[in-house]
Image: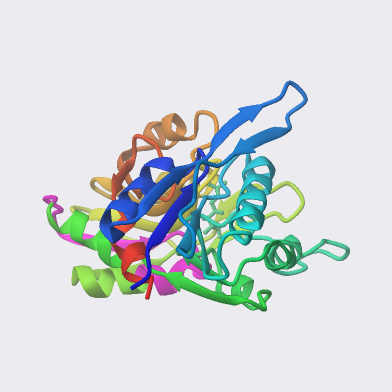
Amino acid sequence: MAKISVISGNTSRGLARRIANKLDATFVPAQIIKFPDGESKITLGKIPKKSIILVVQSTSPPVDTNLLQLLSMISQARKFSSKIYTIIPYMGYARQDREFLGGEIITISVIAKMLESAGAKKIIVVDIHSKIALKHFKVKIENISAIPKLVNYFKKMKIRNPLVVSPDAGGIIRAKEFARQFNSDLISLKKQRNRKTGKVKIQSPKMNLKNRDLILVDDMISSGGSIVKATQFLKKQGAGRIFVACTHAILIDNAEKKIRKAGVKQIISTNTIHGKTAKVDVSDIIANSIK
Ligand code: R5P
């Protein structure tokens, strides 16, 4: 196999270094200076000629800044190689995949075009919010599941009489897969989001959850609103300990505190986004997807 180089911006530096180690690749971290007006000045180190290049950057907050840095790095990488993999462990804007209310712009389709025109050839993402988002891409895009890695982590914990819970109907496929691999029962809550205010409500019937440890499985936590509402509802049904398994823990502002206050014992996420809940490393599944 040809020599591999891994380029990374600041957001995914730790994960990118691990991917580089796994592939025995040259690690090329970008030097990024932020100007007072918010512009980024990006400088790349030496990229070995004729190598396969992996550009790694999650588009987590600050989303637009990280996206522009990613586009710039892809564009630069194209000057050195035609064999480029763009790895976006957390793909921002994937929730904007359809017109929910009249006049809304489907921004993920704009991003797909921007990535393509910057030179992205093959894109790899982890647990993208919805499969519909993938349809907006003309370049090859592969969605890797972090569910087996999250399940392995939870298998090492002492979970009593477990029940896997999807906080909404949209996340049921992921939660079902978690429950199957974890060998446990599954339920899904009925969540309703006000498309104007973004506020969520749980509208599920009463149920008996006494003596059960629950694992809420979701693709991402942003403001924490969905998990807080789900936890408050589940606690009212007599649930025992509540854990959260999610791929992308953005945890805006004091989201983690709000979630803990609602009654969640522990949040376990992956290192698609760096942070203290990021206990599960996905570098191996990303490295394995480079063929
Ligand atoms: C929604 O469909 C997603 O899967 C997440 O549940 C949601 O986007 C998380 O956002 P927040 O933490 O702001 O409720």
The quadrant in which residue 127 appears is bottom left
What span is colored magenta in the figure? Answer: 157-175
Q: Is residue 174 above or below residue 256?
A: below
The answer to whether any part of residue 209 appears in the image is no
Which quarter of the figure is the N terminus placed in?
bottom left
Q: Nearer the viewer, residue 261 or 40?
A: 40
Q: Nearer the viewer, residue 165 or 66?
A: 66
Q: Nearer the viewer, residue 61 or 84?
A: 84
Q: Position of residue 182 (x, y in %)?
A: 20, 68
Q: Is residue 243 above or below residue 40?
A: below
Quick check: is 190 in the magenta stretch?
no
Residue furthest right as drawn? 103
- Horizontally, residue 169 falls left or right of residue 149, namely right
Q: Is residue 103 above or below residue 71?
A: below
Quick check: is 171 in the magenta stretch?
yes
Residue furthest front as drawn? 49
Q: Nearer the viewer, residue 106 or 31?
A: 31
- Horizontally, residue 18 falls left or right of residue 117, namely left
Figure colour scheme: rainbow
The quadrant in which residue 92 appears is bottom right
The answer to whether any part of residue 14 appears in the image is yes
Which quarter of the figure is the C terminus placed in?
bottom left
Q: Position of residue 82 (x, y in %)?
A: 57, 70
